[in-house]
Image (tube, helix red, strand yellow):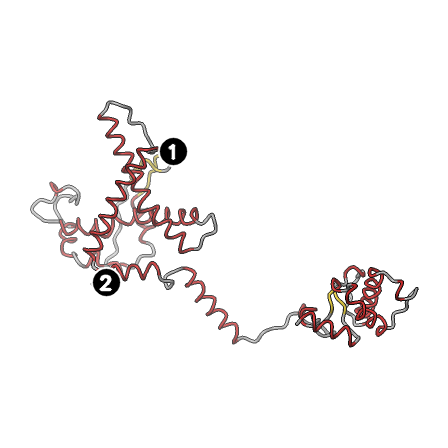
Amino acid sequence: MPIASYVFESKNITLQHQGSDDRVITINTRECMKYLTELADPKDMLKDALLSVQWDLWMQMAFAEEVVDLFDRSTWATHDYEPLLDLVHAKIAPHALHQQRCENHVQMAALTASNNVGEGRRSDRAAALSYLMRDFNMKSVTEVKSIRNAHGKSDKINRVEGRQRIQLFADYCDSFNSRVEHTRATAGEEKCRCLLDFIAGDTNKISRVDLEARKAKYAEGIEKPRKITKAEQNSCGPDITAEMDGGLKIKYILQKYDKEIRAEIECRGIRLSKPYTQLSMMEKKNLLKVDEMKNLAVQLKAREGIQPSDVKQIAPQSAEMLALVVALNS
């Protein structure tokens, strides 16, 4: 089908009630339609079911002698535009409401997650609030207003509270359960089961999508050659931690291990300023720290400005201390 270029009519339209301050906005129809259709493909648009299903009726409406208003049957003349009206209600009208509900649902999901619940529970809470509380709040206010008007009272109320709220909510839950049972019976067990699997399963959760994306990323990264960074390069060899039997933590230099401590001091050849039996446990600990710091400096592993207090473990050299390390970590 040949598609001829079309120039939209240039006309200024005033839109009211835009924004919270009810300001008035004026737009030009030609500029607006140019913006809306600039990236649109006419051929793809013609394939859309919104146009293709009732194409003849759309053409009939477009070339009618008088302007046709789908929402005013008096302008239909002798034609029946009911199928087009049904299309508007089924395909176009729900978009604005659906978008607003999605925005509310996202905000509500964040609100219900404020106490660190998982995505499944926050979604269930948001759904319950959307389908139950929002509808109940609106209907309960309307019902209480009608009751107050009937008794000649003021109908200025934004939210039902107290005993009346509990009574109305109990009635609403009964009505809601009845609607659920009716819907289940109408839809059938198969559709209900599919819906339950869709909601309860993890295949549609965003965490599953993120997990699969991470797995794909990791799988791709494994195939690539890994570059060893400068920080990972150590010409002095790896440092083996105490947890991997590479040393004894300073906190284990205790009186009950005095036999192993003495063997370690003698093995290292540490000079003592007084007999070993006269040394306090703190002095023995400091002797080992200082000697270990000297060993680190010889191995070029000591950073600039290192202090004995920076030494958190010693590398055992005596057989007794090595056996103690193995025993403590086993």
Q: Which residue occupies 67% across, 70% down? A: 329
Indicate the position of residue 182 as horizontal and vertical percent values. Answer: 20, 51
Please report contact status of discs 2 and 1: CB closer than 8 Å, yes or no: no
Q: Amino acid at mark 1?
A: Asp
On screen, residue 62 versus residue 317, left or right, reads left
Indicate the position of residue 207 as horizontal and vertical percent values. Answer: 43, 61
Q: Secondary structure at mark 2?
A: helix
Indicate the position of residue 163 as horizontal and vertical percent values. Answer: 32, 33
Q: Which residue occupies 16% across, 56% down? A: 54
On screen, residue 67 versus residue 78, left or right, reads right
Q: Which residue occupies 35% across, 37% down? A: 18
Disc 2 crowd rating (10 Å Cα; few below 14, some 14-19, many 20+) is few
Q: Which residue occupies 74% across, 68% down? A: 248
Q: Amino acid at mark 2?
A: Glu
Q: Residue furthest left?
A: 78
On screen, residue 109 versus residue 157, left or right, reads right
Tag count in the figure? Answer: 2
Q: Nearer the viewer, mark 2 or mark 1?
A: 2
Q: Secondary structure at mark 1?
A: loop
Asked if 286 appears above or below 24 in the picture, the reply is below
Question: Does label 2 or label 1 sit earlier along the sequence?
Answer: 1
Q: Badge 2 is on which residue?
A: 190
Q: CA distance from mark 2 to mark 1?
A: 49 Å
Label drawn at residue 70 = none
Q: Residue furthest front?
A: 256
Residue 141, by quadrant, is top left
On screen, residue 260 versus residue 45, left or right, reads right
Instruction: Using the image as rendered, state which of residue 144 and residue 88 is in the foreground.
Output: 144
Quadrant showing the C terminus: bottom right
Disc 1 crowd rating (10 Å Cα; few below 14, some 14-19, many 20+) is few
Q: Badge 1 is on which residue?
A: 21
